[in-house]
Amino acid sequence: MLRCPNPNDDTVELLQNGVSTSNRFSFEMFIFTANSTKVYLHCGIYLCLLTDNHCSVNCDSEHHHRERRSVDIHDGTSISVGPLMWSDSSKGDPCHELSCTENEQCEEKHGVYSCSCKENHHGSQHGSFDFTETCESSSGSMSVSRCQLFEAGFSSDILHLNDPSCRGTVRNGRVEFYFDNNDHVCGTNLMANGTHFICENFIVGDPNSVGHLISRERILKLPFSCVYSQTQTLSMDINPLESSVHMNLPAGQGMYQVRMIPYQDAEFAHPFTGSVNAELNKHIFVEVRVDGVDSRQFASVIDTCWATPVSDPHYPLHWDLITDMCLSPNDEVELLQNGVSTSSRFCFSMFIFTANSTKVYLHCAIHLCLLTDDHCSVHCGSEHHHRERRSLDFHGSTSVSVGPLMWFDSNKSD
């Protein structure tokens, strides 16, 4: 309708028309649905003699058609402006959203924006990436340089672990991944080779090839693993009584804690505090506990336990308590729990070495066992025991000591 807003578009507002040499209106931006983001605007205008009193129009008046002057648009003139470009407000500056670090710069490759490495930052060479890995008990985390991945042709948003739902998180210029053995397994495979447990996974980058029969785009597959030592040797130390050993393994390997604690009672409720003073023939209850591993997957197994009159576990004078995962035939020892959980327990009667010593130091060698292998518990009375037990290598073990267990002569008064 001439000189009035289009009744089919309620966003148009005629702000000023026919009162001066300046006319104004507003409307809300739109696009044509025929796959176009551009709009060109055209206006037809004419000059009106103010003395005729027919310049301004009341568009709401029912007499509008009668009151308006008969004007032929072609007698006037027209003006155009454009294009007016549609901008998706949900899309901000791609470089600003990336938050590139001081060693990175925003760059576009094949229509994808990401952070590439600056010249003073080493990019990937010969397929090698700046890769860090941390393994803790039953979990692992790893990170890769974002700019190196982008320079190799892989954007961070296409990367995931074996489980495609486990995607990376960008933090400080690195793409970080995480898995654990609880509710975030992410396709991790757990294996055992006799001396170590291995948690293995992959960082995968596969471009979207849905709907395509073939693809010539490269696929990224970065393997990583967490390795945990299966065997340990530990001993009771002089001080403190409850001693522990933290097994720090090389890069890419995990850590767990082994403790050996002497108790006064069969319920394992009252550990010894201070010095261990026990009468001859008194029962000493010992627990060997492993912390920092998944108790649903692992069990601890005592292989050997022995006593020495000095703190050195390799002292030639020693007395065997447990050998080959079973009780030593030389002593009355009770193996209470072994190979069923991350805690192993046994008890023995207090003794002394006859070579003028009142001190006893206790040492044990253990290994971790994968419960799914069904080789953790041992039937010591079985004739197939030696055939059934796993072949283990202890040359890489560590030792600590706890003790001494002191003989206390109850017949001596203070």
Image (cartoon, helix red, strand yellow):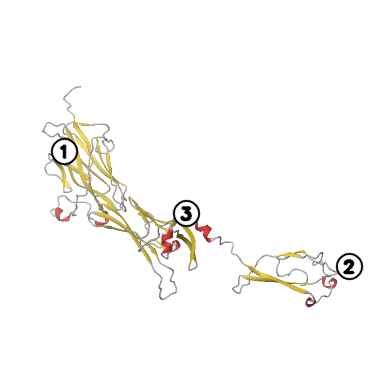
Q: What x and y, as percent, mark residue 79?
A: 73, 72
Q: Earlier in the sequence, mark 3 or mark 1?
A: 3
* Amino acid type at image mark 2: Thr
Question: Extreme front residue here?
Answer: 120
At x 78%, y 76%, the residue is 73
Q: Which mark is residue 329?
A: none
* Amino acid type at image mark 1: Thr
Q: What x and y, as percent, mark residue 237?
A: 23, 37
Q: Is residue 79 left or right of residue 248?
A: right
Q: Earlier in the sequence, mark 2 or mark 1?
A: 2
Q: Which residue is mark 3?
A: 102
Q: Which residue is mark 1?
A: 308
Neighbourhood count class around disc 1 (C-alpha, 10 Å): few under 14, some 14–19, many 20 upward: many
In which image quadrant can residue 147 be found? bottom left
At x 26%, y 50%, the residue is 299
Of tags 3 and 1, which is closer to the observer? Answer: 3
Q: Marks 3 and 2, how far apart in space?
A: 69 Å
Tell me the quarter of the image containing the N terminus. Answer: bottom right
Q: Marks 2 and 1, how far apart in space?
A: 123 Å
Question: Extreme right residue here?
Answer: 51
At x 77%, y 74%, the residue is 77
Q: Nearer the viewer, residue 170 or 234?
A: 170
Q: How many marks?
A: 3
Q: Which residue is mark 2?
A: 51
Of tags 3 and 2, which is closer to the observer? Answer: 3
Q: Is residue 65 left or right of residue 293?
A: right
